[in-house]
Amino acid sequence: MKKHRILGAVAAAGMIALVATGCGRGGTADPAASDGAQEPGGSGQIVGVAMPTQQSERWIADGDNVKAQLEEMGYSVDLQYANDDIPTQVSQIENMISSGAEALIIASIDGTTLTDVLTQAGDAGIPVIAYDRLINGTPNVDYYTTFDNFQVGVQQATSLLIGMGVLDENGERTDVAGPLNVELFAGSPDDNNATFFWDGAMSVLEPLIEEGVLEVPSGQTEFEQAAILRWLPETAQDRMENILTIIGDTKLDGVLSPYDGLSIGIISALTSGGYSTDALPIITGQDAEVGSVQSIIAGEQYSTIFKDTRLLAEQAVAMVDSVLHGEEPEVNDTESYDNGEKIVPSYLLESTIVTIDNYEEVLIDSEYYTEDDLS
Ligand code: BGC
């Protein structure tokens, strides 16, 4: 398998209809297993899977996919959700270690808070795979699998610009000169991904802000001002309401939102603040959650970023299986993810911009959702 990285904003825009190709649905990191002839890896070995929250569909899908795929290979799975509470996640991982887990797959809540518990894992020789979110400040994380998070941010900004007409569908600049009014939201500051999304998005938006094509009427252009702790929709709603108070009658053309849940909060604030649902600004998102895809179909939210959790699960499972067989997992990035202690070898997958124009092809044809799911 080869990684097909999208190379820049323009390319990303051109990829609007592209389905993630990081690896095929039935693929696995072990070429010998690609004909499905791989021996069951597990023989009942326990793998602990720590997920952050069930408040967002994507993590439920991640947990379900990882569990099902591991079980199919003969592993026993201890899947736990921590309700976005850090001490709960730490004690869940402690319990996994003490009850005999032989490998751990962890999607952290706060990537900096697992150092002590992962020392216990390291001392016990238990391999640790960071799932989707990097775990920082510990040498005891062996591999990382995620999407190309910087590129996700590039795609979010690109779709914002396409939606506002600043770029055409091929990612080429149009003659729209603005100034267009946009507000900017970022993810949770304790999630390593949030700065990658932001940096990716700002690599596209900042030059246009400098050029005067875009204006941020609130003046809030720093990550710290835009960040929403724990990715909470209510916090995004509050911030959007405050911004509307600050900017008064200024009409917004776009809102950069890095996650569907935040977009829902933002849309609530906008509709309570006088925007009608058929005249909302262009609003982005991430995760292709059902409610937000429905909102896209209804013409409210403009876009989301689809990250195929089936493929991410497949990578994590392949990594665990390789490590437990004494083999080196396949990686495709050994530079981007420095956790403060080491550069964690990573496998990055591709994501896809989804709008009303391609949701059927990307989400239904790929059987991620059925038509009924979205109606
Ligand atoms: C994930 C995103 C998700 C966000 C909120 C991030 O770490 O990469 O897919 O939208 O967390 O759950």
Image: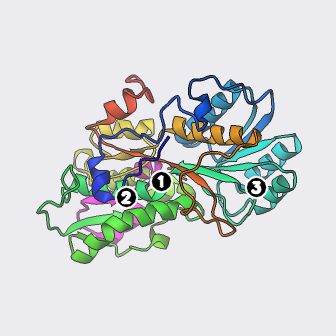
User: Residue 331, how many percent across, how many down?
Assistant: 58, 50
Per the model, the C-alpha gap separating discs 3 and 2 is: 33 Å
Horizontal side of residue 158 vs 318, given as left or right: left
Asked if the beta carbon under badge 2 is closer than 8 A to the nearest atom of ligand 1, the reply is no
**Residue neighbourhood size for the residue with mark 1, other residues' Cα within 10 Å, grouped as few (<14), some (14–19), many (≥20):** many
**Residue neighbourhood size for the residue with mark 3, other residues' Cα within 10 Å, grouped as few (<14), some (14–19), many (≥20):** few
Q: Point out the image quarter for the C terminus.
A: top left
Q: Which mark is residue 87?
A: 3
Q: Residue at x 82, y 55 (%)?
A: 122
User: Residue 332, how many percent across, how many down?
Assistant: 54, 51
Hey, which quadrant is residue 46 in on the image? Answer: top right
User: Residue 234, how many percent across, how many down?
Assistant: 50, 54
The answer to which of 268 and 363 lies nearer the viewer is: 363
> Looking at the image, is mark 3 or mark 2 earlier in the sequence?
3
Q: Taking the image as drawn, is residue 135 in sight?
A: yes
Circle 1 is placed at which residue position?
148
**What range is drawn magenta here?**
240-264
Which mark's residue is nearer the viewer, 3 or 1? 1
Q: Is residue 275 above or below residue 250?
A: above
Which mark's residue is nearer the viewer, 3 or 2? 2
Callout 3, which amino acid? Answer: Pro
Circle 2 is placed at which residue position?
154
**Residue neighbourhood size for the residue with mark 2, other residues' Cα within 10 Å, grouped as few (<14), some (14–19), many (≥20):** many
Horizontal side of residue 66 vs 257, given as left or right: right
